[in-house]
Image (cartoon, rainbow, N blue to C red):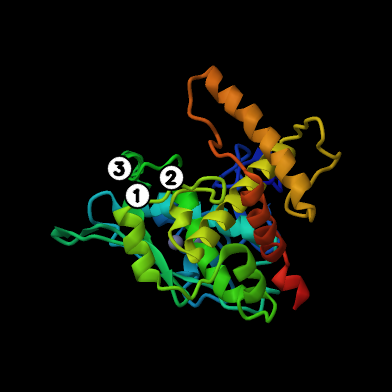
Amino acid sequence: MQRFACPCCGARAYFHNLDCLCGTRLCYDPETRAMVADAPVCANRELIRCNWVADPGSAIGLCRSCAMSRVIPDPGIGDNRLLFDRAERAKRWVLANLSNWGWFTNADPGRRPHFLMLSEHVEGRTEQITMGHAAGEITINITEADALIRLQRRRDLGEQYRSMVGHFRHELAHFLFDRLAVAPDFLPAFRDVFGDERQDYAAALARHYAAPRDPGEDFITPYATAHPHEDWAETAAHLMHLVDFTDSFASAGLTMPGMPPDFRPYEETDTDLLLSVGTEVAIAVNDINRALDNDDLYPFVLTPQVRHKLRFAHRWLSRHPGRDA
Ligand SMILES: [Zn+2]
Ligand SMILES: [Zn+2]
Ligand SMILES: [Zn+2]
């Protein structure tokens, strides 16, 4: 994520900030990717501390991100309001990242996703929710914004990493697959790299949960082995992780051997350079985290086979649909 500044006093501002110490009310404008003052604010600013500007296209004054949430949880039940707040925070972060590549900007003529932001806590009972994407609609279980619940599930599933940002990146990757698949050259190239996605999805998932395969050298995570669609979503999510933490590193003014001066990860077209800088950043920050006995920032290994898939994901996701239109 890039660095921001208060438009009035120039002090540093962070992406989720609502106010500056100078008294300015801060708003993030997703179109210009900058903090602005005196803009119409999102109607969800009070409810969930959304700091984005209201989208002129929204009849009820929601921002671009909140307007994509078709169904929202009842904020009056249990912790729903706080969990909804945290889930939407992660969603705004991921959408802002993707706008660097032109996705869902005003210049992007393509479809935008709709989100069903659901809570397991509904009136008087608990409901099971399966996260996923189907025909442009993404279901998110906001209950996982509770860190303790998420940690429990991560342990039960034997995962190395699980976060709300990760869920949004994974599900948006499925959505973007559908957007990319209209290009005539996408699917043949995809099948060369990930295999044939037309194989039975339900049967593949059932097989995966009955006996998970070892990811070996070919897959970034065990879940990626389940089906080519999941391999794509996991790989594309990891591409987004890598580019974003490398962007945060470069935006903070940090550098390291092999990193070109004025390095801009979201504009970089050389995937190998991006991955080699990203790997060095991960190793360095993992080591810093160990100084405080914290978990590794990025506990994954990028094998040559995985890099080949990441190259494909990078080439297609960074195509700037808005600019090409
Ligand atoms: Zn200020
Ligand atoms: Zn909003
Ligand atoms: Zn998936």
| Disc 3, SS | helix
Q: Residue at x 48, y 70 (%)?
A: 68
CB of mark 3 within 8 Å of CB of mark 1? no
Q: For marks 2 and 3, give the one nearer the viewer.
A: 3
Q: Which residue is mark 1?
A: 144
Q: Earlier in the sequence, mark 3 or mark 1?
A: 1
Residue 156 badge: 3
Q: Residue at x 63, y 46 (%)?
A: 242
Q: Quadrant of residue 138?
A: bottom left
| Disc 1, SS | helix
Q: Amino acid at mark 3?
A: Asp
Using the rendered image of the protein, determine whether residue 188 is visible from the camera's viewpoint. yes
Q: Residue at x 67, y 79 (%)?
A: 183
Using the rendered image of the protein, determine whether residue 42 is visible from the camera's viewpoint. no
> 160 or 84, which lies in front?
160
Q: Position of residue 105 (x, y in %)?
A: 66, 69
118 vs 284, left or right, is left
Q: Is residue 24 above or below residue 69?
A: above
Q: CA distance from mark 1 to mark 2?
A: 9 Å
